[in-house]
Image: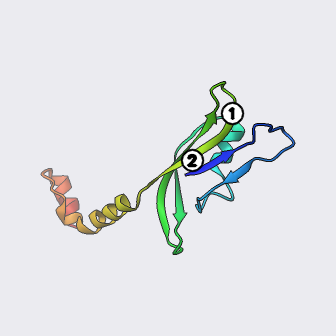
Amino acid sequence: MAILSQPRSWRASYSLSVICIFRANICERDCALGKTLSTKTPQINIPAQIITKQGEQKPIRLSTNILKSHAGEIIGGVETFRDLSDLEELRRQIDQKYVKEDIVGKHPKMQAILSL
């Protein structure tokens, strides 16, 4: 999770302090949390690739939102992600497992196509 927060005495001339553990392919060019804070609009289910400590890329979906105080003041933002590695692995296995021979068609035109 990435958290972006500002001190209570924050003013426009101060910068936000960032605590971020993400190493994703979109971080430097299109920071979802930065976009949320600048537009005040949550970013939901954004596809990205996170980079592990080993340098491997893993598919994720991330979402961001604004954190507000009880008084409704913006005090920061939060970013969460869902690891899609297992889903992608299953998708690869299915893609390798099923071939055109697994398709069943009863219509004569479909049988002609499948016989190619």
Residue at the far front in the pictured view: 8
> Whole-percent x and y of residue 74?
69, 33
Q: Nearer the viewer, residue 109 or 61?
A: 61
> Whole-percent x and y of residue 13?
87, 42
Q: Residue at x 62, y 48 (%)?
A: 3
Mark 2: amino acid: Glu
Q: Which mark is residue 107?
A: none
Q: How many marks?
A: 2
Q: Residue at x 66, y 26 (%)?
A: 72
Callout 2 environment at 10 Å: few (<14), some (14 to 19), or many (20+)?
Answer: many
Q: Is residue 74 above or below residue 3?
A: above
Residue at the far bottom in the pictured view: 54
Mark 1: amino acid: Ile
Q: Quadrant of the C terminus?
A: bottom left
Helix or strand or loop: what does disc 1 sit on?
strand
Q: Is residue 54 above or below residue 88?
A: below
Q: Are discs 2 and 1 less than 8 Å apart at CB?
A: no
Helix or strand or loop: what does disc 2 sit on?
strand
According to the picture, the residue beneath numbered tag 1 turns out to be 74
Distance from Cα at disc 2 to Cα at disc 1: 15 Å
According to the picture, the residue beneath numbered tag 2 turns out to be 79
Callout 1 environment at 10 Å: few (<14), some (14 to 19), or many (20+)?
Answer: some
In the image, taking residue 19 as reference, residue 85 lies left or right, namely left
> Whole-percent x and y of residue 35?
67, 44
Q: Residue at x 52, y 48 (%)?
A: 80
Q: Which tag, 2 or 1, sits closer to the chain's start?
A: 1
Quadrant position of residue 40: top right
Q: Residue at x 59, y 44 (%)?
A: 78
Residue at the far right in the pictured view: 13
Q: Nearer the viewer, residue 52 or 41?
A: 52
